Structure formats: structure tokens, C-alpha cells
Image (cartoon, rainbow, N blue to C red):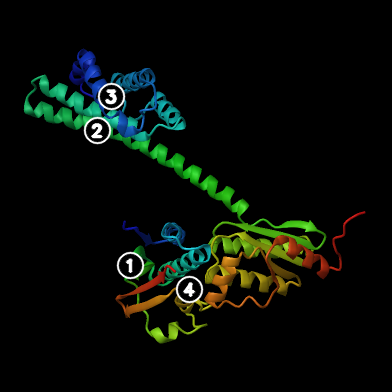
Amino acid sequence: MDKLVIQLLNESRERIYTRWMDEMERVRDEHRLQSITDAAYEETNKELFEIIYTHIEQNVHKPTDRMTQFAEHLMKIGWRLSYITQGLQTFRRIILAVLLDANQSNDKVYSMYDEIDRWIDPIVNQLINESAKNWENTVSIQKVALQELSAPLIPVFENISVMPLIGTIDTERAKLIMENLLTGVIKHRSQVVLIDITGVPVVDTMVAHHIIQAAEAVRLVGAQCILVGIRPEIAQTIVNLGIDLGQFPTKSTLFKGMKTALEMTKRKMIEIE
Amino acid sequence: MNIQSCVEVRNEWDIVKARQSGRNIAKELGFGTVDQARITTAISELARNIYLYAGNGAVAIERVENGGKFGLKIEASDSGPGIKDIRKVMEDGFTTSGGLGAGLPGVKRLMDEFTIDSKENEGTVITSIKWLR
């Protein structure tokens, strides 16, 4: 950056500081920071201001490590990125006003304007990129975590396994259900698999179709499916839709299904005296 | 009081969003659990049809009144390829996507009123109403 500009900014640092703090106080509500104490808000503002100024002093065109760390820390405690980006934008507005006040020629003002834009924009861009990357990372981790939970097959007794399904079934999940069912049935040598749909909020034709296909595939590998956890309202919608679930046994609760499964494998539950 | 919502359907998760808002509105209007399930399932079918066949469209849900009777109206609209033979899609078991072919006839049975308006290469509008009893 131009030496003259830096000099000018250093000279009027106090003035810029007060104006900037005023502006930041005014936009506080926008960033939902009302719950933070005045002292803490002022302290953070002060720190941000100093960090912005170090950019000028060191004459760098990308966020310094201190800036990145500061941003990361604020995000971690739940502040919005817009707080920092707005801080930078407000800063730009104020220093432009200050430079204009300094009575420079038109050409000079234009080149300063240009310079400051080129200085601040990369900083803002990189901060936004970093934060977007962080989000993408979080989302993809959660996606993996969700996938691991989405279709578990639990061997309960010898030859009997249960697959409890909770939540919405989409195409992706339906694929997983099918895969896990088939590999699990073979791995655990299951003869009977209970699919529990108590936690599935809506059974439409697609969900039913996937369940029918899964049950048919399980039959092909020599095991038997029992569909359990059919709530009364789900039973009615299935009938209304005209879906035929007649190829395999269905039960209202997991308990009843388990009893049937034990009978199918020639065992039963008894109470001990 | 005018309860309504409109959900754009572009991906599979929008289907969930559409039926969620449908369920909430149905609950607010005082539908019982069975009718709530019917309405959400119907929305699910219509939204999925939009996603599968048209790519994108919208599902609008609103409260309607007719001579002191209240009901919930679903309007699923898209500007997709349209339906060639409406009589055929209303037959049970007819499908072009390898599904069960129970969607549209199923929705008709789940709801009280059902109309399809479709022009080839222009799009489809399906309107369906469930009356509060």
C-alpha cells in the first residue's frame, strides 16, 4: 500500500477508532449479539480493530494468522462471520471518508480507493472461504455419522436379527438397508429378519416398494422377513394406497414379531418358575 | 386466519419438507392422526412424482372453506413433460419408473377430491382436497 496512505491512516487512528466503534455498536443487533456483555463486546471490537490495523502496518493482502485464529475462535463460540466481514466493510467505509477529508486530488483519491479495495477484498474472501470450508467439513462428517446409523442390523438371537428403522427413508438409505440386510443375513446366518418400522413417519409407495424389494431379496438368500411396528394409521394408509404386503408376515409390534420368529426357528419364550 | 405454505421441490429432502409442513397444517386444522397420515402420505406421493418425473416444481398447501366445511387443499404443480394418458396413470399398477404404480390412484383414495390438469410438454397441476369431518 502507498506509504502516504499508511501514514495518513496511522495519524488518524484515534479518529477512525471512535467512528468505527460507534458504527459497530449500532449494528450489534444485526449479528444477534445482544446477549453478550457490553464489556466483552467492546473488548472483542477492540481486538478486531487492532488486528485489522496490523494488516495495514504489515502491508499484507491476506488474513494474518492472528486474523484466522481470531475468526475461528469467534465461530467456535457462536458468533457470526458477518460480524467480521461487516467490521472490515465498515472499516473500509470509514477510512475512505478519512482519506477524502484529507483533501487529495481526484486522481489520488481514485487510486487510493482502488488500493484499499484490493487490500480488503482478498481478506474478506479468504475468511468466507475458510468458514465455508469448515461448514462443508462439518456437514460431510455428519453425513457419514448419519449413514453409519441409518440401517443397523442387530443379531438378537441365534438365527434371528432385527433391523430397526427410524426416520425418513430416501433412495440412498433404501440402498443401504438392502445391502446391510443381505450382508448381515449371510454373516450372522440369520433365518429370520425383523424389520421394525415403528420410527418411520410416512410409508408411501416408494418406501413400501423398497421394503418389498428388500424382503424379496432376503427370501432369495434363504431367509424370511417379518415386517413389524406397523402403526394403525400406517396400516390404513397402506390399504388406501392399495399396496400389497401379502408376501411376507407382518406384525404390529416387535415383541409379537419376535415371538413369531422364535416359533419359526422352533423355539419359544417361557417364564421360569 | 389463512394457513398456507408453499414448498419448492428440487431434491429428495424437499419432499420431507413438503410433507412436514403438510402435517403441521393438518394438525393445526384439527385432523385426526389417521387423516394426518393420509394427508402426509398423499403429499409425499405428489412431491415424489414432481421430483421423479419433472425434476422440479412446487407443492402448495392451504386451508379451504366451502359452505361452512373446512378442508386442506394440496396443489402440486410442475412444468415437466406432462402426462400423456391420464386414464392410464390412474390405473393401479401402471408405472413408467419401475415403482409400484400405486401413487396417483392411491392419492385419489387417500383424499376426498382429486383433479389432474396436464398438458404434454407444458406441465401438470394436481389438486386434491381432504375435508374435515
Question: Would you call the spot at circle 4 few (<14 residues within 10 Å), some (14-19), or many (20 or more)?
Answer: many
Q: A161 or A4, which is in the foreground?
A: A161
Disc 1 crowd rating (10 Å Cα; few below 14, some 14-19, many 20+) is: few
Quarter of the image where one finds residue B2: bottom left
The amino acid marked with disc number 3 is Glu
Asked whether residue A66 appears in the rendered view, the answer is yes
Q: x, y percentage for residue B17?
A: 44, 57
Q: Provide the residue designation for mark 1.
A: B65
Three-letter code, disc 1: Glu
- Identify which residue is drawn at 12% across, 31% down: A110
Quarter where residue B51 is shown:
bottom left
Image height of B3 relative to A132, above or below: below
Q: Marks 1 and 3: which is nearer the front?
A: 1
Q: How far apart are marks 4 and 1 (CA)?
A: 19 Å
In screen coordinates, is A6 left or right of B115? left
Q: Of label 4 and label 1, which has the lower sequence position?
A: 1
Asked whether the beta carbons under mark 3 and mark 4 sit within 8 Å of each other, the answer is no
**Residue occupying image coordinates x 59% and y 70%:** A235
Amino acid type of the residue that numbered disc 4 sits on in the rendered structure: Leu
Mark 4 falls on what kind of element? helix
For the residues labelled 4 and 2, the Cα–Cα distance comes to: 61 Å
Dot 2: element: helix
| Picture coordinates of residue A5, whole percent (x, y) | 19, 20
State the separation of the CA atoms marked 3 and 4: 56 Å
Badge 3 marks a residue whose secondary structure is helix
Identify the residue position indicated by label 2 in the image.
A118
Label 3: which residue? A25
Q: Could you tell me the amino acid type at mark 2?
A: Arg
- In the displayed structure image, the side of residue A1 where residue A31 appears, left or right: right
